[in-house]
Every structure is written in C-alpha cells, then in structure tokens.
Image (cartoon, rainbow, N blue to C red):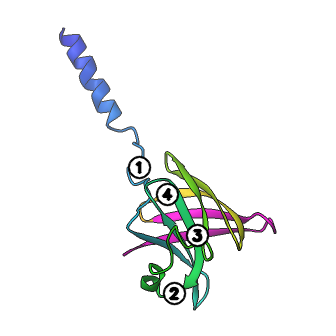
Amino acid sequence: MKKIVALLFIVSISFSFVPREKSNCAVMYNGIYAYKIDAEHSAIIRFYADGTVLASTSVNDYMDVFSWFHKENKDLVLKGKYTIKKCEIKFEVSGMTGEQKYNGVISGNTLNIKLTDKESKKTADRVYTFFAL
C-alpha cells in the first residue's frame, strides 16, 4: 500500500511539469479584432457565439464600427462561420465584395492569421488585436 501511495505521488509530481494547453484559446464577442492596414484604415473581424464571423475594412475609429458592423448589414460585410480546434481558428467569409479564407491561432487577445483572397490567391500574414466595446 505504501508503494502504491508513493508511486501515485511521484506520478502526480511528474504531471505537474507537463505543459498544459493554453486556456486563452477562445474568441471574444464583446468587441472587434483589428489589424491596422495604414494610417487611415484597418481590417476588422467580429465573432458571435453562434459561430458567425464578419470581416470588413474600416477607418481607424473603432467605436464608430459598431453602428454598421453587424450581421444584418449584408452590403458592407463579409460573412461566414468559424471553427476552433484547440487554439487554431479557421473560417471563410464571402459577400458582395469578395471571398476570403482565414487560418490562424488564437493567443489571448490576439489572432495570428494567414489571410488568402480567393480570387487573386494573394496571401497576407496579420496579427489582429482585440478592442472591447
């Protein structure tokens, strides 16, 4: 019995040194993720709990974004569904202005994304940062 208790103790100590999966691998819904393109414009992403994701571009005044950056505004946004597996996120969005594919990693309040434009096949690596409402 003492040997079993000692063995269990050693095993539990060993597991304490095994790296654990990050717990900050979820997207946030109470704001937007933005990537500054230039002095005036940003690329923006918004997530919803139902799996919907929106993407667009905007001027850099993020608080104005919430007046038009929502699911019902089909003219100005690209819309799709996202999936998250561990810390990896994937989604494709489409709308009147085109189609894009996003693959990346969630890390706290940032998204490290590889973006591919479906028509031109051009890619871009971007780090989006979260901004709360």
The residue beneath circle 3 is 55
Q: Which mark is residue 61?
A: none
- The answer to which of marks 1 and 2 sits earlier in the sequence is 1
For the residue carrying disc 1, how many other residues have a C-alpha within 10 Å: few (<14), some (14-19), or many (20+)? Answer: few
- The answer to which of marks 3 and 4 sits earlier in the sequence is 3
**Residue depicted at x 39% and y 38%:** 18
Query: In the structure shown, which secondary structural element does the residue marked by tag 1 occupy?
Result: loop
Q: In x, y percent, where is residue 92?
A: 65, 58
Determine whether 37 is above or below 119 in the image. Answer: below
Label 3 to label 4: alpha-carbon separation: 16 Å
Q: Amino acid at mark 3?
A: Ala
Label 1 to label 2: alpha-carbon separation: 31 Å
Q: In x, y percent, where is residue 69?
A: 51, 75
Q: Amino acid at mark 1?
A: Lys
User: In the figure, is residue 53 to the left or right of 15?
Assistant: right
- Between 117 and 8, the one lying in front of the other is 117
Label 1 to label 4: alpha-carbon separation: 10 Å
For the stretch drawn in magenta, what is the main secondary structure? strand
Q: Nearer the viewer, mark 1 or mark 2?
A: 2
The residue beneath circle 1 is 22
- The answer to which of marks 1 and 4 sits earlier in the sequence is 1
**Residue depicted at x 42% and y 83%:** 63
Q: Nearer the viewer, mark 2 or mark 4?
A: 2
Query: In the structure shown, which secondary structural element does the residue marked by tag 2 occupy?
Result: loop
Q: Nearer the viewer, mark 3 or mark 4?
A: 3
